[in-house]
């Protein structure tokens, strides 16, 4: 049933959910959301995205394969998401979110086993029954990455109108080679991101996490003359 959430409310309320209920999501609903999201802007209308939706046995297969690889500690990244060396204020923002996430999980800062457990949870889609991988042709350039990002944002916003929540998961791209093999994604395509989708488990303390955003007065540069 549609909730008729306003666009502003959907944007402000959007969050990255890290614990879902196992309640199934109808395939037709997933496709409806993707159809709605496809109205995202796309330069010259090339619509560069492909979405691999995994449920049931396919979901279990890719989850198991990547979890096993993650436990070895050997990554095979699709691309570099962050620079090798970060600077302020980005370092502090990233650390603050990480510390708060570990606190809600009950993980001490020096608990490396606990941190590894937190990472592995990504690869079960945080319990969500639906996983998605956003893919595009590898030869495409920055403009198509922008298009794909706006399409993903539309998916996350539209899902809320159907009572669903999401979590974008770039973590899967640290093991891109395994995802390629599990889902038969050809090497000519690049995995941009994963995403979990399902019904939120409101009883999970980790879902209390709310990341901060700086005020527009701090990042907007207004030119008047």
Image: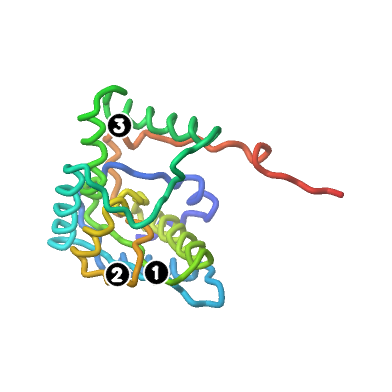
Q: CA distance from mark 2 to mark 1?
A: 8 Å
Q: Secondary structure at mark 1?
A: loop
Q: Secondary structure at mark 2?
A: loop
Q: Earlier in the sequence, mark 2 or mark 1?
A: 1
The residue beneath circle 1 is: 138
Residue at screen point 32% across, 29% down: 102
- Would you call the spot at circle 2 few (<14 residues within 10 Å), some (14-19), or many (20 or more)? few
Where is residue 154 drawn, in percent x and y? 46, 60
Instruction: Tell which of 172 and 84 is nearer to you.
Output: 84
Residue occupying the far right of the picture: 225
The residue beneath circle 2 is: 187
The residue beneath circle 3 is: 205
Q: Quarter-wise, where is residue 1 in the image?
A: bottom left
Where is residue 217 drawn, in percent x and y? 68, 38
Apparent side of residue 143 relative to residue 38 in the rendered image (left or right): right
Do labels 2 and 1 touch, CB within 8 Å? yes
Apparent side of residue 70 relative to residue 40 in the rendered image (left or right): left
């Amino acid at each position: 049933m549609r909730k008729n959430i306003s666009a502003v409310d959907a944007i402000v309320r959007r969050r990255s959910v890290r614990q879902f209920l196992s309640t199934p999501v109808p395939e037709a609903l997933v496709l409806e959301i993707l159809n709605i999201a496809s109205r995202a802007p796309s330069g010259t209308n090339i619509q560069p995205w492909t979405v691999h939706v995994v449920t049931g046995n396919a979901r279990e297969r890719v989850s198991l394969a990547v979890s096993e690889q993650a436990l070895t500690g050997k990554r095979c990244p699709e691309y570099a998401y962050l620079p090798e060396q970060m600077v302020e204020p980005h370092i502090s923002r990233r650390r603050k979110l990480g510390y708060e996430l570990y606190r809600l999980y009950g993980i001490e800062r020096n608990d490396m086993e606990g941190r590894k457990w937190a990472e592995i949870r990504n690869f079960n889609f945080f319990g969500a029954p639906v996983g998605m991988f956003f893919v595009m042709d590898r030869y495409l350039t920055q403009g198509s990455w922008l298009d794909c990002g706006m399409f993903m944002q539309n998916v996350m916003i539209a899902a809320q109108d159907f009572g669903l929540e999401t979590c974008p998961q770039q973590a899967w791209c640290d093991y891109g080679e395994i995802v390629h093999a599990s889902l038969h994604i050809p090497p000519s395509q690049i995995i941009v991101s994963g995403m979990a989708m399902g019904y939120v488990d409101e009883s999970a303390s980790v879902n209390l996490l709310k990341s901060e955003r700086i005020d527009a007065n701090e990042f907007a540069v207004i030119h008047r003359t």
